[in-house]
Amino acid sequence: MSNSKPQRNPVQAIVVAAGSSQRMQGTDKVFSLLLGKPVLAHSIQTFLSCEEIDRLVVVLHPERIDLGIDMCRKYGWEQRVRIVAGAERRQDSVCNGLNALDDSSIVLIHDGARPCIETSLIIEAIQVVQETGAATAAVPVSNTIKKT
C-alpha cells in the first residue's frame, strides 16, 4: 500500500478582463483602485490563495497587457499568472484563455470585474463540478453600483 495522496484532477482558472471599457467612458474598471488595489488584483489574489487552483490565466485587452504584467510584478505573481490577450468578443477572449491552459479536467472562468469572489465559492464550484460535471456559481445581487 502506498501512503501517497490520491491524485486529483487538475483545476485551472481563467479570469477574463479584456473589455474595452465603453460603458465606463474609457475608464478601465478592472484597473480602477478598490481598497488601494486594482479591482482585478482582488480576484487574482483570491484565486491564487486557493490551494485547489493549479494554474491561473488572466485575459486582458491587448492594450492593457503591460498594465497586467506590471501589476503581477508589483504583487509577486509573475511566476504564477499567465497573461494572454483578449479579443473583440467575450467568447473569443474566453477561447484565448482556454487555449493558454494545460490539459485539465476542471476549468473555472471568472469575470475580472467582479472582485468579491470568495475562496469558499471557488471550492464549492470545484466540488460541484467533480460531482456533476458542470456548475455555474452565482451570488444574489442586492444593489448595482454605477459611476455617474
Image: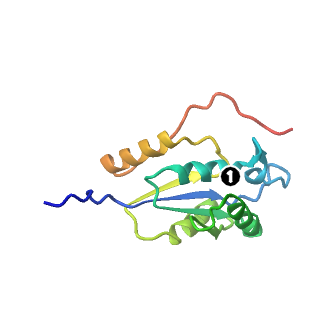
SS of the residue at dot 1?
helix
Dot 1 corresponds to which residue?
Answer: 40
Q: Position of residue 113 (x, y in %)?
A: 67, 49
In depth, the one of 111 and 89 nearer the eye is 111
Q: Identify the residue at image location x=57%, y=48%.
A: 46
Establish if 47 lies above or below 84.
above
Establish if 99 lies above or below 56.
below
Count of numbered tags: 1
Tag 1: Cα neighbours inside 10 Å, few (<14), some, or many (≥20)? many
Q: How is the image coloured?
A: rainbow
Q: Is residue 6 left or right of residue 117?
A: left
Q: Position of residue 80 (x, y in %)?
A: 56, 64
What's under tag 1, amino acid-wise? Leu
Q: Identify the residue at image location x=68%, y=58%.
A: 75
Q: Is residue 81 left or right of residue 120?
A: right
Q: Position of residue 61 (x, y in %)?
A: 71, 65
Q: Identify the residue at image location x=83%, y=39%.
A: 147
In depth, the one of 85 and 4 nearer the eye is 4
